[in-house]
Image: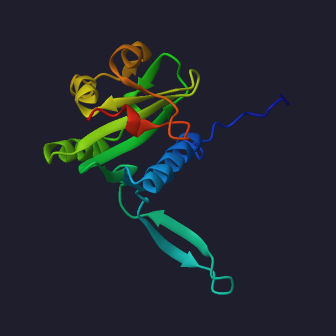
Amino acid sequence: MARGYKKRNSHANRGKDLEMYILQANERYSLLEVAEIEQIPVPIGIDKVDSKTKKITNAFFKDKSTVDFLGVSNGKFIAFDAKETEDPNKFPLQNVHEHQYKKLKQYVIQGGLSFLLVHFKVHQETYILRLLDLSLWWENDTSSIPYDFFKSKCIKCGPGRNVPIDYLASLPT
């Protein structure tokens, strides 16, 4: 590395692989008519548009996003957020925003199924962290959830239905 050069860790594409796998699974679920799960876009406001090219030159986030995905499977409402961590030993709870946690909790109160889909990049493993389990750590003001908890208490998602992460097959009914 050249002297004076500092590598920057961009968060711009963090979670894009996991997102792509989820979108593939969602397309497959729709094709098989087992679920309709939609990705929820982040609300964006347009500030400036180039009058010649009609391209957006400046935009901003209007509101906080709720969760990444909403839908229904077998008559059950599903809400979840996809999270990824590079830490092999734990999942930092700072990756979950308070408004996301509150929204997931509200969906459960209304009879829905809420969870986080957590991907450990180093282990190449994805787990379903149910809201009840997340609450145990969240309400105790813990900074992270150990990887061992995921291995012993959470639902591991594997491939199936011709997709790399068949998270629906892993969900409790």
Q: Residue extending furthest front?
A: 32
Q: Quadrant of the N terminus?
A: top right
Q: Is residue 64 above or below residue 143?
A: below
Q: Residue at x 56, y 36 (%)?
A: 164
Q: Residue at x 30, y 22 (%)?
A: 142
Percent across and percent down for residue 120 are: 51, 26
Q: Is residue 120 visible?
A: yes
Q: Is residue 141 left or right of residue 39?
A: left
Percent across and percent down for residue 66 are: 33, 52
Q: Nearer the viewer, residue 66 or 30?
A: 30
Q: Is residue 104 above or below residue 127?
A: below
Q: Residue extending furthest right?
A: 2
Q: Nearer the viewer, residue 172 or 127?
A: 172
Q: Is residue 116 left or right of residue 104?
A: right
Percent across and percent down for residue 86 are: 55, 27
Q: Quadrant of the C terminus?
A: top left
User: What colour-coding does the image apply?
Assistant: rainbow
Count of marks placed on residues: 0
Q: Is residue 84 above or below residue 155?
A: below
Q: Residue at x 47, y 56 (%)?
A: 31
Q: Residue at x 19, y 42 (%)?
A: 108
Q: Is residue 95 visible?
A: no
